């Protein structure tokens, strides 16, 4: 009597290590010691700029002139990090950012201050996402989530330190739009074309895009055409939450930005097309970087609102990841299992 062995999932040869899909340029500096020194200098500049810029929202006895130079230092460090990560020209983009920041600090005209603050918000939001790495397990996802929020928070205090005279709504919209545009161009340059998306992942991308349009459209319609009773109800809910728990979660972060961050880094562990989901995560990080642009913003309220948004968005993202993971497992139960992707280290270039 013969028995038929149950056929399980076929696996690729694990003895052959996975390789990164894109060619990576040679090290920009020949000496490894010099490269480490430059990396440490940039990291120290980012930390110092963040620390001093953060003091602008704290009641400390410091001269007011110190904050804008700190914001300039932070902006240049963020630009260096983003340019290096995306494989851009370090001799061009950080230099241009440095010139803009230098002029803004020296001349302090409204236009230059607004432009410098916008640059800080954009590069902070995009680098917060680009600096993440593929994450497969829960611990790795939490790590990347914290990394992205930390970088975005540094961009927020940098924007606040510029103390630029802006219209808050217009400024926030411009920063979000510019950050999304920059993220799309960088993701496209990484070769994450739509042709590699399976039907499930393409459905995820379309679903996130629909959610973006729905949330933005609903908010605009309510503000423009909502009845006085509905607007009063919303104001009452916001006031109650603000007085009881100290903050109000932001829908665009809860339903779009932060869940996209979780799903994107998880998808990237298998497919590079996960970068497309992370484009929508830039919306969440851009909202964070612009959250302190108003001089009248209360730091405690903004911090608690971001914290509540992060917790809710993280939970929603983990739930979406679980649903998508179970569906993907069912569909590919008898298919060849895809190996985990590898990417360059966090502080190395992606191309």
Image (spheres, rainbow, N blue to C red):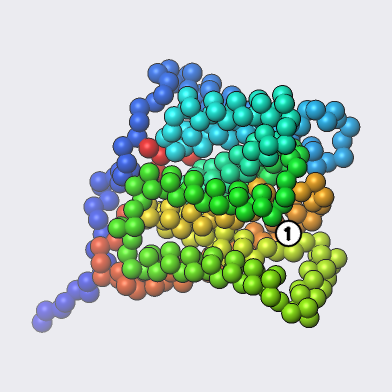
Residue 70 image position (x, y, % from top left): 71, 30
Residue 45 in the image: above or below residue 135 = above
Residue at the (38%, 64%) spot, across then down? 201
Compare residues 261 and 116 and report the one nearer the observer. 116
Residue 307 image position (x, y, % from top left): 70, 57
Q: Say which quarter of the image contains residue 67.
A: top right
Residue 62 image position (x, y, % from top left): 85, 30
Residue at the (68%, 63%) spot, across then down? 250
Q: Name the outermost residue toward the left.
A: 1
Tell me the element at label 1.
helix
Residue at the (79%, 51%) spot, across then down? 297
How packed mark 1 is, by other alpha carbons closer than 10 Å (few <14, some 14-19, many 20 or more), is many
| Residue 147 visible here | no
Left or right, 96 with respect to 207, comes to right
Residue 313 in the image: above or below residue 108 = below
Residue 134 image position (x, y, % from top left): 45, 50
Compare residues 103 and 246 and report the one nearer the observer. 103
Which residue is label 1 attached to? 305
Residue 301 in the image: above or below residue 83 = below
| Residue 31 visible here | yes
Q: Quadrant of the C terminus?
A: top left
Q: Quadrant of the N terminus?
A: bottom left
Compare residues 135 and 262 and report the one nearer the observer. 262
């Amino acid at each position: 009597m013969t028995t038929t062995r149950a056929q399980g999932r076929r696996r690729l040869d694990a003895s052959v290590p996975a390789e990164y899909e894109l060619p990576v340029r040679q090290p920009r500096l020949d000496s490894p010691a010099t490269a480490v020194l430059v990396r440490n200098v940039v990291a120290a500049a980012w930390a110092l700029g963040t620390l001093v810029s953060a003091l602008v929202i704290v009641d400390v006895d410091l001269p007011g002139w110190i904050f804008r130079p700190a914001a300039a230092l932070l902006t240049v460090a963020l630009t260096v990090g983003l340019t290096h990560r995306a494989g851009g020209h370090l001799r061009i983009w950080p230099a241009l950012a440095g010139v803009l920041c230098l002029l803004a600090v020296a001349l302090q005209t409204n236009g230059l201050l607004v432009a410098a603050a916008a640059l800080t918000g954009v590069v902070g939001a995009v680098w917060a996402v680009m600096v993440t790495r593929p994450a497969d397990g829960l611990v790795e996802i939490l790590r990347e989530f914290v990394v992205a929020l930390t970088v975005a928070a540094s961009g927020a205090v940098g924007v606040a330190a510029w103390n630029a005279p802006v219209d808050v709504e217009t400024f926030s919209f411009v920063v979000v739009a510019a950050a999304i545009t920059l993220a799309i161009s960088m993701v496209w340059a990484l070769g994450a074309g739509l042709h590699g998306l399976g039907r499930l992942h393409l459905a995820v991308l379309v679903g996130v895009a629909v959610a973006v349009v729905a949330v933005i459209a609903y908010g605009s319609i309510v503000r423009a055409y909502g009845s006085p009773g509905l607007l009063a109800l919303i104001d009452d809910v916001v006031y109650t939450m603000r007085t009881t728990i100290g903050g109000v979660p932001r829908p665009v972060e809860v339903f779009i930005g932060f869940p996209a961050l979780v799903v994107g880094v998880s998808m990237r562990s298998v497919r590079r097309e996960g970068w497309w989901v992370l484009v929508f995560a830039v919306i969440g990080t851009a909202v964070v970087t612009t959250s302190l642009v108003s001089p009248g913003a209360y730091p405690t309220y903004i911090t608690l609102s971001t914290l509540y948004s992060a917790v809710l968005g993280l939970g929603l993202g983990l739930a979406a990841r679980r649903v998508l993971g179970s569906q993907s497992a069912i569909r590919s139960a008898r298919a060849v299992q895809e190996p985990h992707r590898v990417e360059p280290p966090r502080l190395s270039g992606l191309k």
